[in-house]
Image (cartoon, grey):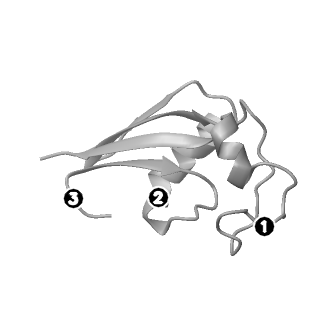
Amino acid sequence: MGGRAWVKMVVENPRNENNRGDKIAMGMMRQIVDGAIRSQYTAHDAVYYAEPIRATGGCLKCHGSPAGEPDPYFPQYAKNGWKAGEVIGAVVARVAAE
């Protein structure tokens, strides 16, 4: 993960591996998807904060319905079946303690 701080768009199965969260970020993302408005966590070495990512109309061209259909721009990926307004992940910020 590297660095003193990072911000990631954390989803369950990211297309971009740079957005894969660590164990704590993944747990926070699941809390958000399950309905939490925000999530905060203080670890021994860092502070985390997360808020929801909601699918918008712009997301749906590549990630919308039907699930499993090829993405029109990147056909190596399949659409996710997301719906407008659905919480699909979390923006997670992590800042390491000095």
Residue at 71 percent of width and 30 percent of height: 85
Q: Amino acid at mark 2?
A: Asn
Q: Alpha-carbon neighbours of circle 2 within 10 Å: few (<14), some, or many (≥20)? A: some
Q: Is residue 90 left or right of residue 93?
A: right
Q: Position of residue 64 (x, y in %)?
A: 77, 48
Residue at 49 percent of width and 48 percent of height: 9
The mark nearer the N terminus, 3 or 1, is 3
Q: Is residue 37 left or right of residue 49?
A: right
The mark nearer the N terminus, 1 or 2, is 2
Mark 2: secondary structure: helix
Residue at 73 percent of width and 63 percent of height: 71
Q: Amino acid at mark 1?
A: Pro
Q: Is residue 26 left or right of residue 75?
A: left
Residue at 63 percent of width and 56 percent of height: 12
Mark 1: secondary structure: loop
Residue with the most extreme right position: 66
Q: Amino acid at mark 3?
A: Gly
Query: Which of 98 and 88 lies nearest the eye of the viewer?
Result: 88
Pointer 1 residue: 70
Q: Which mark is residue 19?
A: 2
Cα separation, mark 3 vs mark 1, equals: 35 Å
Is residue 22 among the parts visible in the rendering?
Answer: no
Above or below 83: residue 12: below
